[in-house]
Amino acid sequence: AQSVAQPEDQVNVAEGNPLTVKCTYSVSGNPYLFWYVQYPNRGLQFLLKYITGDNLVKGSYGFEAEFNKSQTSFHLKKPSALVSDSALYFCAVRVTGTYKYIFGTGTRLKVLA
Amino acid sequence: DADVTQTPRNRITKTGKRIMLECSQTKGHDRMYWYRQDPGLGLRLIYYSFDVKDINKGEISDGYSVSRQAQAKFSLSLESAIPNQTALYFCATSDSTGGQPQHFGDGTRLSIL
């Protein structure tokens, strides 16, 4: 079965430090991978996606994600965290051959001032 | 004005009642989706529609129905609500080129007593 996993329920990082939010996936064929962010009382906002090409994908708000095929991972990163980055982050994968998207359970990022 | 508007934002109702959640969008997107979000489970797809005449079941469609009244409107109904349908519901849209859900409403928090 195709799936996506976010192994950490919460990640804490100090402001100004680099942050990483982890995501691993299991799909047949080439993966289409996505990251979204959700702020309190709001819907999800699309951050970035990997379809093909360069393994390092740049997205909105200074975020980037690194695709690693051998480790089946797509970790979200940012070189210097801001308090305003505190939110819930979701990784998602497209089910091969369909238009269905499987979302992870979410990781709450808390950036401490 | 928001690109994707959901009404109501909050609703409390009783078991057995019929409920309709409405979604309208100003993005001009063909594709619309309904998801539910439960703590620890991420987002799960209920129904999706690629145009007015196209309706497809998602992974958890039992107990739900939808209507695509126009390109801009996609409503979700619970014919006879039950307590385990208590959740946060999101409508989303995407264009036919982007693929992934791109724009989400701010959600409807539904409580069934």
Image (cartoon, rainbow, N blue to C red):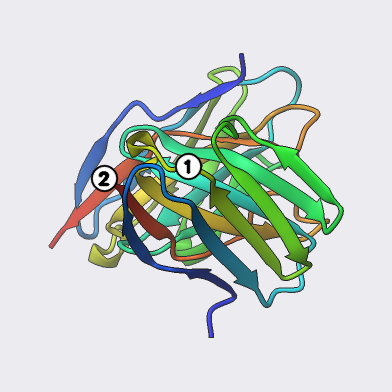
Count the labels in the image.
2
Q: Residue B101: x and y, percent?
A: 64, 53
Secondary structure state at the residue bearing disc 2: loop
Whether residue A58 is visible, yes or no, is no
Chain under numbered label 2: B
Chain under numbered label 1: B
Q: Is residue A47 left or right of residue A43?
A: right
Which residue is nearer to you in this view: A82 or B17?
Answer: B17
Amino acid type at circle 2 is Leu
Q: Is residue A36 left or right of residue B70?
A: left
Q: Residue A27 appears in which quarter of the rendering?
A: top right
Q: Residue B27: x and y, percent?
A: 70, 74
Give the residue pinned by disc 2.
B113
What residue do we see at 56% from left, 65% from top?
Answer: B22
Q: Residue A53: x and y, percent?
A: 75, 41
Which residue is nearer to you in this view: A52 or B105?
Answer: B105
Which residue is nearer to you in this view: B108 or A28?
Answer: B108
Give the residue pinned by disc 1.
B80
